[in-house]
Image (cartoon, rainbow, N blue to C red):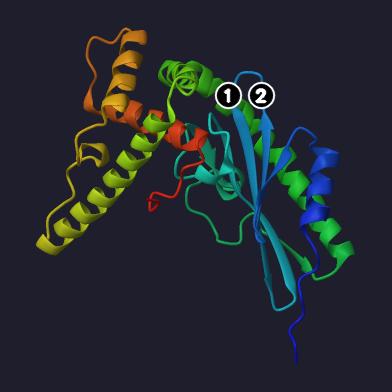
Amino acid sequence: MQSAKCIPVKKRLVDYMCEWFPHFIFQGGDSRVYAFRRENSDGIYDHIIIYREFFEGVLSLVITEVASCYNKSWKGIPWFTVGHGTGIGVLITGKQYYDANTGWHRCKNDPDELQKILTDIRGDIDTYVIDFFEKCHKKIHADKRKVITNSYMQTQFLTLSEEDIQAIKAYLVRVNKSYSEYRKDCKKRGEKVTTPYFDIIPLHPIVEHWVADIQEQLNYSYLSESIRMQLIGDTTVLFRDNYNFYNLCEK
């Protein structure tokens, strides 16, 4: 006996979001992930990512991630986010650890039932998500390093040559590969991983230049290791976001 197919969800979900949250524009996804984004005048983007499951005739939806950040693309969330993000479970419970069913909405494989859980999703957005976005915007505005880093990087993207772009991409791939090998070696030897991610190979000259310029704009005479790593991380995340370069296995 052929198993039942899930009813179409994407069009109904996109239409529903367009009706109730018209500023959140559908950005794409796949058969299970639906990403929506709101662009704000201050350069911050608000993302809502909804996940679908279908099992044994039961259709389930949940808001997996929400984020306010300088990332234009949803693809780097939650791993590479210049801003703040969380899951609906955290917003509902106020805790980092919660029941796995928190935030999930389930219904029968029926269009009328789907409409009901779309209303539940809307309730979560109204009750928890919009307020979270407002708080995140205030935090980002108060974070001088992130504001200056983003502003600086947007100007840099206008000056990079294609050769520069490809060189930085290759550098990020090398860092990722070298760090993976370093972690494996540490595991084999039974040693702790102590070398920071971007210290595994020499910093690319362009990235080093970015960090020095931002340090100057911040009027910092000295960078602690943690701030240095934050600046390197944020600049390279924004680079990856701008050039849609999230697969570090690319050649």
Few, some or many residues within 10 Å of mark 1 (<14, 14–19, 20+):
some
Q: Position of residue 113 (x, y in %)?
A: 85, 64
Residue tagged by mark 1? 137
Q: Nearer the viewer, mark 1 or mark 2?
A: 2
Res 127 quadrant in image: top right
In the rendering, which numbered label is found on residue 224? none
Given contact means CB atoms under 8 Å apart, are the residues at marks 1 and 2 in contact?
Answer: yes
In the image shown, does 138 or 244 lie closer to the viewer? Answer: 244
Q: Residue at x 77, y 51 (%)?
A: 120
In the image shown, does 159 or 46 lie closer to the viewer? Answer: 159
Q: Amino acid at mark 1?
A: His
Residue 104 shown left or right of residue 249 in the figure: right
Residue 164 shown left or right of residue 50 in the figure: left
Q: Position of residue 181 (x, y in %)?
A: 21, 55
Residue tagged by mark 2? 40
Q: Amino acid at mark 2?
A: Asn
Helix, strand or loop under label 2: loop
Q: Residue at x 30, y 39 (%)?
A: 171
Q: Residue at x 26, y 54 (%)?
A: 180
In the image shown, does 228 or 57 lie closer to the viewer? Answer: 228
- The Cα–Cα distance between marks 1 and 2, rounded to whole angstroms, is 10 Å
Q: Is residue 140 visible?
A: yes
> Going by the picture, which residue comes out furthest to the left?
189
